[in-house]
Amino acid sequence: MSRSVRISLACAAILPFVSAAPALAQDKVKLSVTGSVRVRAETIGGQFRPNTPESDSFLSFRTMVAAKAEIGAFTLVGEVVDARGYGESDKSSVRTSEINDLEPVQAYLAWRPVKGVQITGGKFAMDIGASRLVGRTDFPNGVPTYLGAKIEAKDKNKNQLVLFWTRPFTALPETPADIYDNKVQLDRATENIEFFGGNAMLAKLYGNTSLETYGFRLIEHDRTTHPTRNRRLVTFGARLRRAPAKNALDYEVEAALQRGLARATAAVTDVRDLKVRAGFVHAESGWTFDGKWAPRVAALFDYASGETANPNTFTRFDTLYGARRADFGPLSLYGAFGRANIVSPGVRFEARPSKRLDLMASVRGAWLASAVDSFASTGVIDRTGKTDTFGGVQFELRARRWLVPQKLRFELGSAWLAKGAFLHDAPNAPRTGDTKFVHADLTLSF
């Protein structure tokens, strides 16, 4: 996209706000402030990542404060997140997703020209669809943000349309030393990446089943100090969903294909464009039983393509700016499974013994979709493809309880990765036992 076109888009996003500015003085201002403070303690042993400590502990504090001013058809929003962490080991896996001090994550103006339509311009976070490709994650302390414009439309039947054009922000600081020191440095809007697209949802395709379709475009170029893989990706897909309900079968199927061009590495000497041929599938089906606890049991399946030995294509799926906690378990010091080079069936159990308490347990196995690519989010790889492709079995438990309803919540969770042959025998796999992870969170909301 040329510079003149980008300027035109920015002006088009701002013009409605400027032209309607005189009307602001005629309306009363409605102000509101919300926020939260979360403290998390976590520990991991039997690390699965190469070149990191076998065990690690981390104490983090996340403070979020958001202010909103509503003036007639306009809404002005500002939000600051302060995410700090302490106690991690040297060479820890902790990065800016967990430590990002004093960052204004949102600063935008929204305008509602007619009922059901909102136009937003500025810096904002996004959650689109099931958040698998564009999501505001909650388990990590950091928040992915974007600079640009967005149009959202919703009708009385809850059908929705979202269109956006943005430049994603790069979280700073970038060096591990500065991250561990909790250095304050404002994130930077990436001049070399454009991310735009849309999502449309039909709320009732038939019965209580909804249908979403989407398309996203990412265009990336090298910066002088930051060589990249020059990704030029088009990702398009669909999601079919029937929401859980008592004494009823629910289901969800989402699938996406990824096409375009990319380079195998970010090396300056790598100037060969490869055709991208990647994709992912998520499927689950569950049943919610009647009764006080409303227990739900669901079968799960996830597949995401990995890189193959074909020198002319790039086939590892890129999850873009998606969230993965809901599908693959806790992140931060953990986060073994992800939406790349994985074949993973599983089972999940959920229950709500009371309005203040909810429970979850899950188990899922995982194999490599491609034997020569890095397994999921572990960084473990065998380029010869000779190691057994069984990654392991992950067990997860979680309990959340409101100590004070809607004000103070405690969460306790754990994950155990029983490592398979690949995580034991691959050339760069840490020679440790099974991975065990525990976290405890206390969140105060106001």
Image (cartoon, grey):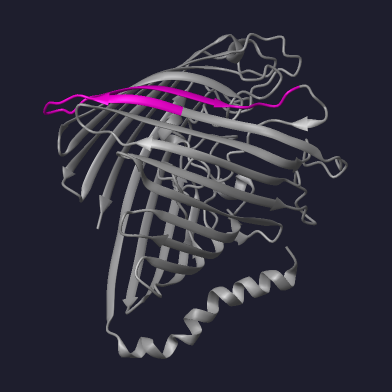
- In magenta stretch: residue 142: no
178 or 220: nearer the eye? 220
Q: Tell whether 390 sits left or right of 193.
A: left
Residue occupying the far left of the picture = 292
Going 63% across and 8% down the picture, which residue do you hit?
A: 388
Which span is picked out in magenta?
283-308
In percent of width and height, residue 418 lies at 47, 13
Q: Quadrant of residue 277?
A: top right
In percent of width and height, residue 410 lies at 25, 39
Q: Tell whether 340 sits left or right of 442.
A: right
Inspect this view and state whether residue 67 appears: yes
Indicate whether 3 appears above or below 163: below
Q: Quadrant of residue 421?
A: top right
Inspect this view and state whether residue 97 appears: no
Q: Quadrant of residue 297?
A: top left
In percent of width and height, residue 417 lies at 46, 18
1 or 59: nearer the eye? 1
Indicate whether 234 appears above or below 281: below
Going 37% across and 55% down the picture, which residue do you hit?
A: 63
